[in-house]
Amino acid sequence: MQETLFCLRVGHLLPYSMSDSNTTDFTNPSTFILLGIPGLEAAHVWISIPFYSMYVTALLGNITILFVVKREPNLHGPMFYFLCMLAVTDLVLTTSILPKSLSILWFNSREIDFNACLTQMYFIHCFLATESGIFVAMAFDRYVAICDPLRHSTTLTNPVVAKIGLAVVLRGSILALPYPFLARQWPYCRTNIISHSYCEHMAVVKLACADTHVSSYYGLFVLFCVKGLDVFFIAISYIEILRAIFSLTTKDARLKTFGTCGSHVCAILAFYIPGLFSSLMHRFGSNVALHFHILIANMYLLLPPMLNPIIYGVRTKQIWDRLLHLITNKGT
């Protein structure tokens, strides 16, 4: 009887010991499991509809911007070159997360390879930093065009624009490197289940069974010191731009001049405000529902790429006119 009870106890504990070994015997798991949007599993299909619509809009809008600028020699200038850089950045950024997120929402395909997860993390942070740098470059372009218009063509030549673009990409590439390297070094002995729809940095790092303050501090460093400096330089540029605008004699001249900056201002607000809100909420909003965290994080990566081509296409007269010209010519 005692032998039978002993066997039953061992048999009862065996599944737990096996399960425990599955979660404690890896320091670098071969795969992670993305849950999508926990708490809203029943609505995954419905949530995928706006996600897919935003992704398609971003793809079509940014490809259209690239096509119009390439086709029209009159648009071959610094402002439109920076706009093309922004379009390419948005295309890569959305494509790095949306296909996998949609496969989770549509097909419940939750597994992602460990290295693929770190690669996705790298691309997200690389191109977010790149986009922030492009906005600084565009602010500098507007500053020179309005505050020193006679020297605009000699200051922002094609080689200078290319060097600025290269510097922005290199900065984003270098700043993003510590994210996956730090995430790779932590031991993941608790679980490999990520409560998110993509490999968001803090969502992955929180799975580690080690002191991960270095990763958290580096994320805050990039947020406040890098993007904070970008916002500072953009603000300085626009202070000088506003001074130049208010020094103009007529109201029409002021409105016309400021109108050339309207698209850039709208795009900046669409990028930085949700980004700041998402980052701070993820770190300090412990009382906010998890699914709300994830929805905001997705909106942060989807809204700017979708809105940028709409903002620039509608508000930038040269692009709108050229697009209408191409459409009407094709129709005749």
Image: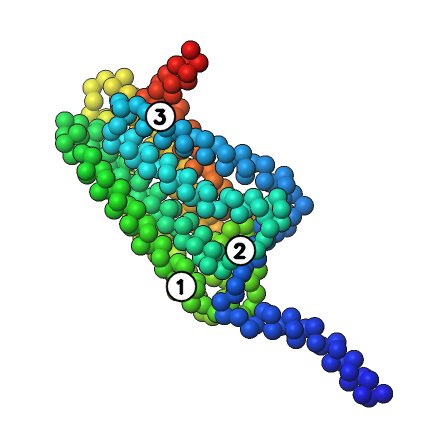
Rendered residue at 41%/32% (across/down): 63
Out of 237 and 91, give the one closest to the viewer.
91
Please, which residue is most extreme toward the right here? 1
Residue matched to label 1: 182
Instruction: Characterize the local packing of mark 2: few (<14), some (14-19) or many (20 or more) Cα atoms within 10 angstroms.
Output: some
Residue 73 seen in the current view: yes
Label 1: element kind = helix
Disc number lying in front (1 or 3): 3
- Image marks 2 and 1: residues in contact by CB distance under 8 Å: no
Residue 80 in the image: above or below residue 224: above
In the image, residue 154 lies at what x, y percent?
14, 31
Residue 201 seen in the current view: no
In the image, residue 224 lies at what x, y percent?
35, 52
Instruction: Characterize the local packing of mark 3: few (<14), some (14-19) or many (20 or more) Cα atoms within 10 angstroms.
Output: some
Rendered residue at 42%/44% (across/down): 93
* Picture disc at residue 295: none
Residue 141 in the image: above or below residue 272: above
Out of 233 and 33, give the one closest to the viewer.
33
Task: Please tell me in which quadrant of the rendered image residue 254 appears.
Answer: top left
Distance from disc 3 to disc 2, alpha carbons, whole Å, reads 37 Å
* Picture disc at residue 68: 3
Residue matched to label 2: 112
- Image marks 3 and 2: residues in contact by CB distance under 8 Å: no
| Amino acid tagged 3 | Val
